[in-house]
Amino acid sequence: MMILDRLKRRFVAALVSAFEPSGRPVESSSGPQADSWAAEVESYASMVRPTADVRFGDYQSNCAMPLAKRLGRSPREVAQQLVDALQLDDLCHPPEIAGPGFINLRLKDECLAAAVAAALADERLGIEPVAEPLTVLVDYSSPNVAKPMHVGHIRSTVIGDALARTFRFLGHHVITDNHLGDWGTQFGMVIYGFKHFGDEVALSSRPVDELSRLYRLVNRLIGYHAAVQDQGAAVMAAEAAEQAVARAEEVVATAADPKSVKSAGKDLAAATRKRLAARQRVDELGSTIAAADADPIFLDQARAHREIAAAVLAETAKLHEGDAENVALWERFLPYCRDEIDRVYERLGVSFDYTLGESFYHEMLGGVVERLRQAGLASDSEGAVCVFLPGFDSPMIVRKKDGAYLYATTDLATLFYRQQEFRPDEILYVVDSRQGEHFQKLFAVAERLGFTDARLVHVHFGTVLGDDGRPFKTRSGTSVGLESLLDEAVAKALAVVCDPQRGGRVEGAMDEPEQRQVAESVGLGAIKYADLAHHRTSDYRFDLDKMVSLDGNTSAYIQYAYARARGIMLKGDIDPDQVARDQHPPLLTEPAERALAIVLLRMGESLQQVRADYAPNFLVDYLYDAAKAYAVFNDHCPVLKAGSVEATRSRLVLVALTARVLETGLSLLGIRVVPRM
């Protein structure tokens, strides 16, 4: 059991022993009162946490304050009663009470050293699997496969992969499913494009390039016509926004009292933001139209295909209706599309247990609508079939007027299939925040249909931004291709970690294949790590130069710390497995040794935080703390030249455990280590 868990269990026992709810011993209580007190005890025990300042010990609890409020007593008095009941002699020095009632705990060095040796000898680093494993289904990545993957797919892919790896390590039964968009409008676009602009020779020789070209062309044509149609309204909206700002400025100028000034200032700020958005919209539409006007060939194509948006929808509808020509084209194109995304996944080291796309569920969609009707949830509205839900301004449409089904219908079919096939306890949908209302409706409908066996969670995340603070795009305004981004990251990593000036510090020069291997691991790790370093709900700015840096909170910094630890073992011709088998507790005579030992034993705590919040950044933060602690240790505590056999043997335990912890932690993030950099 992890040290923090052991401390919490001791606090539970002390709380039960020292305090009585409503004047009755817990042991003699029964019913709701006892259940409530038991929950309170667990809540108070959970307040044991690592200290922010080592001067106050290793762990600290402030549970005496809320407990004192409940009991109507002094916090320090409650803290003392709790300390008197705590049984920690085998783990800690006598607890200390500080301030208004903080309980400070400092681990005994012999306990700490024994835990380090035990963690190194254990393939799980002393982290026990959960007592009650759950079946957790993780739905992530899910690109539309008729077009190239772009930077927008990176977040779902790496967050979902990290969660799946972490949950598996914790002992849960994890099922991963890549719910591909292989049946939607994007295929209607490619089919239309092939029929009107396709090149059979190019498709035979370079199928992925040709399908990508067709998708981009049709998408651009649709975008151009939409821009022409929307430009007038956008200009009017921008003019109205300018007038709104002018009116707001007048109100600010004439406001007299402070309250009015503050209110007017807020209105002006809101109006200014709307003006900026309106101006940007006009600029975007103008750029789209100007680019077309400068391209005579494209402009001729646009004039010849004025109704392309409606035509694409018609091609999509024919595919869904089983039109022989369109189904044959879909069957021809799909393997090429799958090969492309599989190549990206293989490069990223991401795999799935199942890849059940939208097409897999198509035959089930009519049954979903019928099930909703029979449950009294679906009704006709203006020719469409809708589910009206309280609390939402718009209904969930499950079948359009033209008979086409929507994402909501497919997601319900998917949910029913997963319930029957996998019996999950929990389903995680790793999808961006903009789909929040969709999942709220989906979960609400599922609950009304009696789907209560599994907990449904929308693991939502923010947006990847460019330097301008807006969604990351190329200069032409299109989404950045994911594969080209990976290539750029590897090139940047090659320049940084295989710099000839640094190369002289590496034992033996790296040949070109090794340099490429190191650059691939560091470059791809940089993109993953930078994404996971932010809490998933936050937006973040994409900056490759920072991502591949050997300084700061980057994967390269962690990988370099691992390489330094492995380098000591290689230089001393030491077998790390033998160090683990010897199980010699470290001496911990230096502050840097003790500080490193404390951090190395906290990995399990970070994984529990990842599990609780579905947020891999807790593991990222932990690995950065561990690498920093190792850097301090490395600077202050020589290993191979420690001065004595005992000191060297002691420090090798910490070096070996550091390497194991960093390698394991990075692997849970889907990042590879390298033996040297």
Image (cartoon, rainbow, N blue to C red):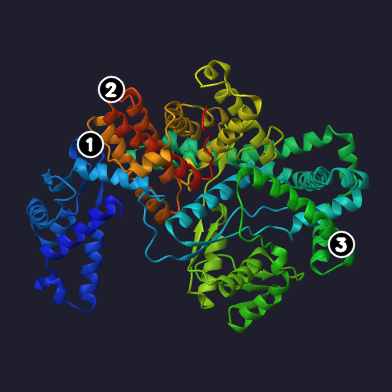
Q: CA distance from mark 2 to mark 1?
A: 28 Å
Mark 1 closeness class: few <14, some 14–19, many ≥20 residues within 10 Å = few
**Residue pointed to by mark 2:** 643
**Quick one: label 3 or label 1, which is nearer the N terminus?**
1
Tag 1, which secondary structure? helix
Residue situated in front as seen by the camera: 444 or 223: 444
Which of the two discs, 2 and 1, sits closer to the camera? Answer: 2
Residue 655 at x, y = what percent?
A: 37, 34
- In the displayed structure, does residue 446 sit left or right of residue 40? right
Q: Are marks 2 and 1 in contact (CB under 8 Å)?
A: no
Mark 3 closeness class: few <14, some 14–19, many ≥20 residues within 10 Å = few
**Quick one: label 2 or label 1, which is nearer the N terminus?**
1
Which of the two discs, 2 and 3, sits closer to the camera? Answer: 2
Q: Are marks 3 and 1 in contact (CB under 8 Å)?
A: no
Give the residue type at disc 3: Ala
Residue 304 at x, y = what percent?
A: 91, 47
Tag 2, which secondary structure? loop
Let me know if residue 466 appears in the view: no
Give the residue type at disc 1: Val
Q: Residue at x 57, y 41 (%)?
A: 464
**Residue pointed to by mark 3:** 328
Residue 78 at x, y = what percent?
A: 10, 56
Let me know if residue 592 appears in the view: yes
**Quick one: label 2 or label 3, which is nearer the N terminus?**
3
